[in-house]
Amino acid sequence: MINKKEQTLVIIKPDGVQRGLIGEIIKRYEKSGLKLTGLKIVIPTNKLIESHYLVDLNWKTKVGEKSIEAYKKKGLISPSENPIEIGDRVLNNLKKYLTSGPIIAMVWEGMNAIAIIRKITGGTEPLVSDVGTIRGDLTIDSYEVADSDGRAVRNLIHASGSAEESEKEIALWFNKNEILSYRLVSESILYDVNLDGILE
């Protein structure tokens, strides 16, 4: 059964807020037909950021292995061959980045919400993100520059990667009463089988 009310978490990171891109980012998701059901502005704590990234207990290992592999592909020497050590370093950089100022946390809802949001957002590294995506169009950062500066890549947005991740992340950032259930008129066009009522 297709879930027409799939939910996903999106965070506009401090660079997106500081560059005045909140409206542009929301507009792109809204134009797709997804519905905004939760919205807040907060300055997150280190503890919240750590909890957010460690909803996947293997996150440090995965990120560390991916980073080490990326160094090798570029012909560079990784600062460590220990994935956990690299994962810790990435997490510390993310904490500095995401607690540096206000962020916008959002819950978006709709059919294929997770995949649609990730498609509109673009790849994690802005430099190689497709033209037409938020990251491809609105920022210029790269892993190479971020690594040389000893910081996290500034890529404007976090978007949940799976249904399981989304469920855990939304529970971290929102109480149930902060997520609204309501109907948009446009849902009749997007979801009603026979488009009943258009000519009424």
Image (cartoon, helix red, strand yellow):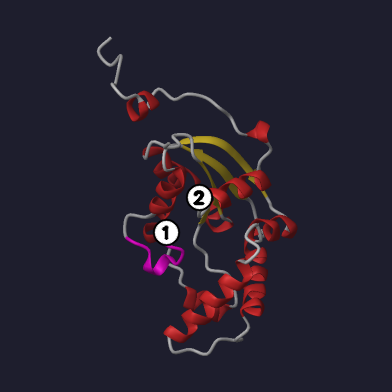
Image coordinates for residue 70, horizontal then vertical, percent: 47, 79
Frontmost residue, 76 versus 56: 56
Query: Where is residue 37, by image quadrant?
Result: top right
Q: Main secondary structure of the magenta part?
A: loop
User: For the residue marked with disc 1, what is the amino acid?
Assistant: Arg
Frontmost residue, 183 versus 3: 3
Q: What residue sits 50% from the left and 40% below the top?
A: 108
- Secondary structure under the numbered disc 2 in the rendered image: loop
Relative placement, left or right, of 34 versus 168 is: left
> Going from the N terminus, do you reach mark 2 or mark 1 first?
2
Up-down relation of residue 103 to residue 5 (above or below): below
Magenta range: 123-130
- Label 1 neighbour load within 10 Å: few <14, some 14-19, many 20+: many
- Secondary structure under the numbered disc 1 in the rendered image: helix
Residue 135, labelled with which disc? 1
Relative placement, left or right, of 77 versus 122 is: right
Q: What residue sits 62% from the left and 64% below the top?
A: 97
Q: Which residue is mark 2?
A: 20
User: For the residue marked with disc 2, what is the amino acid?
Assistant: Gly
Residue 34, labelled with which disc? none
**Image quarter (top left, top right, bottom left or bottom right) of the C terminus:** top left
Is residue 126 a member of the stretch shown in magenta? Answer: yes
Query: Where is residue 185, by image quadrant?
Result: top left
Frontmost residue, 5 versus 22: 5
Image coordinates for residue 54, horizontal then vertical, percent: 66, 61
Is residue 17 a member of the stretch shown in magenta? Answer: no
Which numbered disc, 2 or 1, marks the residue closer to the eye?
Answer: 1
Query: Where is residue 14, by image quadrant?
Result: bottom right
Frontmost residue, 125 versus 72: 72
Image coordinates for residue 180, horizontal then vertical, percent: 58, 29
